[in-house]
Structure formats: structure tokens, C-alpha cells
Amino acid sequence: QLQASGGGTVQTGGSLRLSCAASGNTGRINVMGWYRQAPGKQRELVATISRNGQATKYEDSVKDRFTISRDNAKTMVFLQMSGLKPEDTAVYYCTVVTNTQYWGQGTLVTVSS
């Protein structure tokens, strides 16, 4: 089970930190990450992080603005977002991969201009 939090409404240029806590059979979690889905658009990858935290991947539009991190002791993944833009408005979903992919319920981020 994945529980995401931290969404909200901010003005352009603002910051938010998303958190996602995993519970259940967490010992097999490998990659953790965040996707987002804007109204009328397909879900897209935002960022992923490897099991040991050494390898990260970002969607081009969020590079240098977003930072993904994880705490394996607490089985949590975070997304620090800064320099937010209206086009970042979306529902953000956390995800984890074991031998399959699991999704959280989503948290809404709204960036006002």
C-alpha cells in the first residue's frame, strides 16, 4: 500500500515536498518513483530512484527543479519540487516496483500563475 501526501496549491515559483510511504511487503521494493497526470493528458514519468539511491532519472522539464530521494529505513520516497510552474499542475502518483509495479492514490498539485 502506498500513501502519498504533500500536495497543495502554490504560486508560480513556489515549492512543495511530496512524500509517499509504503507499507506491506516492502522488503522487495526496488525502484521508487513519481509520475504525474495533468488534465486531459496521459500519465508521464517525473522521476525515479534506484534501490540504493545512487541512480536517479528525471523528465527533462523538471531537471534542475525537482529532486527525488528515498529513505529505505522508513520505506518512503520524496519529491522536492521548486521553481514550480503552472504546467506542473497535475495529480502526482508515487510508484514502487518489486516484481510488479504498484501505485499510490495520487496527490494534487496546483500551481497558480
Image (spheres, rainbow, N blue to C red):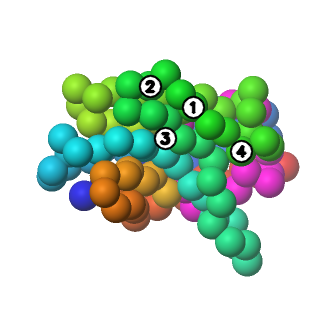
**Would residue 80 appear left or right of 28 to someone viewing this image?**
right
Foreground label between 4 and 3: 4
Foreground label between 3 and 2: 2
Of the two numbered discs 4 and 2 on the same chain, state the one appearing first in sequence. Answer: 2
Give the SS element for disc 4: loop
For this orientation, the residue located farthest to the bottom is 40
Give the extent of the magenta segment: 79-92
**CB of mark 1 within 8 Å of CB of mark 2?**
yes
**Alpha carbons under labels 3 and 2: distance apart:** 17 Å
Foreground label between 1 and 3: 1
> Which residue corresponds to the image point at 27% horizontal and 36% vertical from the top-left?
75
> Circle 2: is it few (<14), some (14-19), or many (20+) Cα within 10 Å?
some
The residue to which callout 4 is attached is: 59
Q: Where does the image place residue 90, in percent across and percent down from the top left?
A: 65, 60
Q: From the viewer's perspective, is residue 15 above or below residue 7? A: above
> Which residue corresponds to the image point at 70% horizontal and 56% vertical from the top-left?
89
Q: From the viewer's perspective, is residue 74 above or below residue 59? A: above
Nearer to us in this view, 17 or 55: 55
Looking at the rendered structure, which numbered label has been put on residue 53?
A: 2
Residue 102 is drawn in which quadrant? bottom left
Looking at the rendered structure, which numbered label has been put on residue 18?
A: 3
**CB of mark 4 within 8 Å of CB of mark 2?**
no
Q: Where does the image place residue 110, in percent across and percent down from the top left?
A: 66, 54
Specify the amino acid type for callout 2: Gly
**Alpha carbons under labels 1 and 4: distance apart:** 10 Å
The residue to which callout 1 is attached is: 56
Q: Where does the image place residue 96, in percent across and percent down from the top left?
A: 38, 51
